[in-house]
Structures are given as structure tokens and as C-alpha cells.
Amino acid sequence: MELVSLDSPRWKQLRDAYGSAELTPDLIKRVADESDPSLSPDPARLNVNSPWDEVWSSLCHQGTIYPATYAALPHLVSIAGNGNLWTKVQTLTFAGDVCSQENSVGEVPEDLAKSFEDALKVIKQMSLPIIREAVVAYSLHQCPLPYLLKSAVALRAGPRPMVQLLEEMGAGGESEVDIECPQCSRYMVLDLSDIPTEEEEADLPVTAREVNEGLRLLNKGEDSWTADCIVQIVAALAFQLGDGSLSRTFLNLHASAKCPECEHLFRIAHGLVAKPLMG
């Protein structure tokens, strides 16, 4: 990746959430100082006065990304490549947040586009190893699995209602989904944890067939990441990483819903819509 030098006057020309991004190089240097693998940082300690708070507030502020974001992300990914696990987790979740947003201020500067895309390719390759390592090293209340998986999905599929759902699950175990009938647009709310299941199947774990199918789709490449594929892949990864409850709940997106208005029967995943943002 060709990075914008931290000494370059280009930073003064770029914009972040607060105006000129001239202070962003110093912020990147603070992230690098915190990334030393020999420090083996404790996430609880790093949450106090962490430079990552400033990374989010200046470069992905309230769901908006800025020209400086495109210049900074390649630096963060480069740091993460040789950094400690907590730096890798923070970089992954930040990159996932950037890719899950539809709001941006201005177009991607032409001179930053290639390095930004290159950085996304690198963090995509790193994402699943980071998630697996984080699940082993940290308790999931520090790194909620749905939120980590949300980042992996967002990097490959961009902003989708399913990405928002994973974020909500990570924030507080939210399992309600907003859906819309594909035929008549009737709006409904369903709880994925309360989907009716055939009695003889109610207590069965996720099957090996479902897990293998999800892993097969994962290995096919990102072109196959349709809504149905995301359900299978997330369910397989969650099961593989020890969260059978998340796996089963997510697979319920493949269950059917019947519209009370027009009686159209459709798969829940096909009617999923983003929840209205609270202002």
C-alpha cells in the first residue's frame, strides 16, 4: 500500500469531523505507540483515554466518514499487521464500521482510492483470524461475537440490514427484526428468538450440514455473499466459535413469514429492512 506520509502537507487539505485533518498524523502515531506486541495490552486498560475513541469520533463520526478516513485507514491496517491483538481488533471493527456506513462527506479523493481499497483487501484477509484469536484471548463481553462478525460481513457486503442486525445483537442481544413484505410492502416486526419451530426439531443443535454449507460458501469468495449466503456463513462461524445460540437465532432468518395483509409467504431474510435511525 502507498501511504500518505505522516509528514505530508496533504493532511491539512483533508477533512475530518472537526475540520482540517492536520492532527490525524499525531493520532495515528499514538495508535502505533499503543500497538507494541510486547505490551500485551489489557482491553480494560486501553479503554481509558484510548486514541481509538478519537479515531472513531474524528474519522467515523455518528455514521459519517470523511476524506481523511480514506487516508488514515491504510495506516491503521499497516499498524495492525504487526501490532498486538487489541490493535487488530480495533482496526477490524473500525474498518467494519466504515464499510457499513452509507453517509460520507464528499467523494473519495482520487489519489487515496487505491491505497484505501488495498487496505480493505488486507483487513478482509486478516478478519477471520483476528476474530478467532479474539474469541480465545478475550471474554466476549469485551469483544461481542456478533459485533466482530458484523465487521467481517460489512467488509465483504457493505451496508445491509443484516449488518445492522449483527451490530444490535452485539450491543445488547437484540433479536427483533424489521421486515417488509416483498409483495405488498406491509411492515412487520418479528423476534428471531421466538420463531415457531417444528416440535421434533426445536431442541436440535445446528447440524453439521448447515455448518459445512456455511463454510463452503465462505470459501467460494465474496461474490457469493447474498443475503441467504450471509445467513449461512454467520451461522456456521458462530457455531464454529462456540456460540450455538447466535447460530440458531441467525438461521431463523431462513424461516418463512406470512404477510397478514396479502398472505404472501416469504423468507424472513428476503424481507429484512434497516430499522429507522433514532435521531
Image (cartoon, helix red, strand yellow):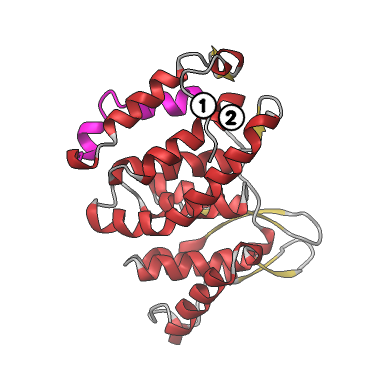
Residue 55 lies in the magenta-colored region = yes
Residue 262 lies in the magenta-colored region = no
Which amino acid type corresponds to the residue marked 1 in the rendered image? Leu
Would you say residue 195 is visible in this rendering? no
Q: Is residue 45 above or below residue 81?
A: above
Packing grade of label 1 (10 A; few <14, some 14-19, many >=20) is many
In the picture of the structure, the residue carrying the numbered disc 1 is 59
For marks 1 and 2 on the same chain, the one whose residue lies earlier in the sequence? 1
Which amino acid type corresponds to the residue marked 2 in the rendered image? Ile
Indicate the secondary structure of the residue bearing disc 2.
strand
Image location of residue 275, percent across then percent down: 61, 44
Q: Is residue 246 left or right of residue 13?
A: left
Please identify the quarter of the rendering in which residue 201 is found: bottom left
Q: Nearer the viewer, residue 122 or 56?
A: 122
Image location of residue 123, percent across then percent down: 47, 49
Q: Nearer the viewer, residue 190 or 64?
A: 64
Please identify the quarter of the rendering in which residue 27 is found: top left
Q: Nearer the viewer, residue 157 or 259?
A: 157
Most extreme residue toward the bottom, as rendered?
A: 200
Would you say residue 28 is visible in this rendering? yes
Q: Is residue 172 left or right of residue 104?
A: left
Q: CA distance from mark 1 to mark 2?
A: 6 Å
Image location of residue 84, percent across then percent down: 28, 43
In the picture of the structure, the residue carrying the numbered disc 2 is 65
Q: Is residue 234 above or below residue 165?
A: below
Label 1–label 2 contact, CB within 8 A: yes
Residue visible at 49% across and 25% down?
Answer: 5
Range of residues picked out in magenta: 40-59
Indicate the secondary structure of the residue bearing disc 1.
helix
